[in-house]
Amino acid sequence: MLRVIAVVGAGAMGKGIAQISAQAGFQVLLFDVNTAAAEKAKSDIFLQWDKMQEKGKLSVHLCSAAKSKLRVVDKMTGLASSDLLVEAIVENLDAKRDLFAQLDEVVSAHCILATNTSSLSVTSIATKTRLPQRVAGLHFFNPVPLMKVVEVIHGLRTDTAVISQLRDFVKEIGHTPVLAKDTPGFIVNHAGRAYVTEALKILQENVADVSVIDQIMRSAGFKLGPFELMDLTGLDVSHPVMEAIYQQYYQEPRYRPSQIAAQRLQAGLLGRKSGEGFYSHLATPANSLTSDVDMPMLTIPESTDVRWDVPIWISRQDTDAHAFLSGFFERHGIQLDDGILPSERALCIVAPFGEDVSTCVAREGLDAHRTVGIDTMFANDAAVTVMLNPATDAQMLRQLKNKLSERHCIAYLIQDSVGFVAQRIIASIVNVACDMSQQAICSPADLDLAVVLGLAYPHGPLSWGDKLGASRILLVLRNMLDSTGDPRYRPSPWLVRRVQLSLSLLQQAQGIGD
């Protein structure tokens, strides 16, 4: 049974782990090579408990009890009584290995050694210890008291009993454990790759500017757009993780980073912490949250005549998309052209899945000047993404945008692209999650849970794939792969097989020998 918890490292993570462990009733020993830093962390924790007590979030009794459980030790030998030791020092493999080798000489044989690493191999960290079977990963997220998910990572030599004890410990401190293999990025950092890497690819292709991409993704349900997220996290944090996972997976195309992020990191455009990132975060209100990479490519001439008397013709290539768009335009008071072929005045609407408008124009023999695409996977009466082709008539497009605006519907205008914006990003997110499931990095249920709790996505990626339709996701990926030849879009076997058998993406295969 775990009674005494040691925390090594008094930074933000160590401080948070110590706080919630003592709150849960464990005896906590806090150690840092800088004893003053450990004492400062203890004072900060006590102050936090006092504030919680004042707000009624912690009773007087529990506040006093928690304070009695937390103690700073000034020498590593003071950790000898630990049942569980959680390391939360600098993210450096050699430093963590050396620390664990030293701890081998201090703690008892039954003490579990857990690393809070977010990106390093637990198996590699354990190599210098006498008992690698007692070493595991226990990855908390910042801020620890608020982020309720903890990744419990099984190294190649970790004893299963150790994993069971850690899982119980996480539950006792009021958090949610998710179990993961020792693989690059574990669950959350791995599953979150596609959100930012695909957004950077879209920006690189000049499909849309930073602010439009962010607005589209927020409209799709995310709390922050990908560029807002990178500015919040800081490129000095997010880009090295992108590169690390890409390299650790031996240049797997699905995780390919972007030279845009690399260049901006070199320029010191880190995000909020530097005052400038993809957006300006300077104090001057006029500069606040303005992007320095917004592109003028979609500056459509303003129309002085906003009257709309052009009928809308909708492609019948997809029955569901045709039905949705017919209802959409009828609700917005726009006349429809119901002909099998479009009349000479009609604006033609296509609804590609993973294709661009130019491909639809060529396949259906449409007039490119008066054809645009609408993303029906992520459209609603309040917002739609409208995709041009290189020949689209700008004046007709502006009139449509104004007409929709009159009906309180935002039209996000983007250039021709395979998969629009939201289709590309979310199909990529689902595909990465499917491949993680194929590798058995974690259970499908734990994957979805970790992503919702750790990344605040509106849905777990596998559940989201089911909700949107796994066959649709597969179609988007296959069309993007066919159009671009880029192996980043190749569908995971997990996805393909479940579509073929009409199974949920959460459906695990039966274990051989069960």
Image (cartoon, helix red, strand yellow):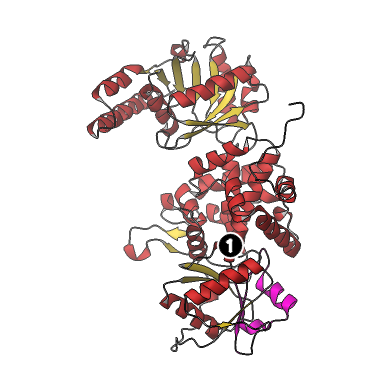
Residue 341 among those drawn in magenta: no
Give 483 or 275, whichever is nearer the viewer: 483
Instruction: Give x and y (percent) for residue 486.
Output: 73, 58
Q: Secondary structure at mark 1?
A: helix
Q: Is residue 414 visible?
A: no
Residue 363 among those drawn in magenta: yes
Q: Is residue 293 left or right of residue 392?
A: left
Instruction: Give x and y (percent) for residue 143.
Output: 42, 37
Q: Amino acid at mark 1?
A: Met
Give the answer, above or below, for where 318 lies relative to 199. below
For label 1, the crowd category at 10 Å Cα-Cα, with few meaning under 14, some 14 to 19 and many 20 or more, is: many
The quarter of the picture where the C terminus appears is top right
Q: Which residue is mark 1?
A: 377
Give the answer, above or below, for where 462 lies relative to 275. above
Q: Is residue 478 visible?
A: yes
Residue pictured at 43% horizontal, 88% vertical: 304
| Quadrant in the picture for residue 148 | top left
Instruction: Give x and y (percent) for residue 325.
Output: 57, 72
Residue pictured at 65% horizontal, 68% vertical: 319
Q: Is residue 194 left or right of residue 74?
A: right
Magenta segment: 345-373
Please tell me how many numbered marks the rendered image carries.
Answer: 1
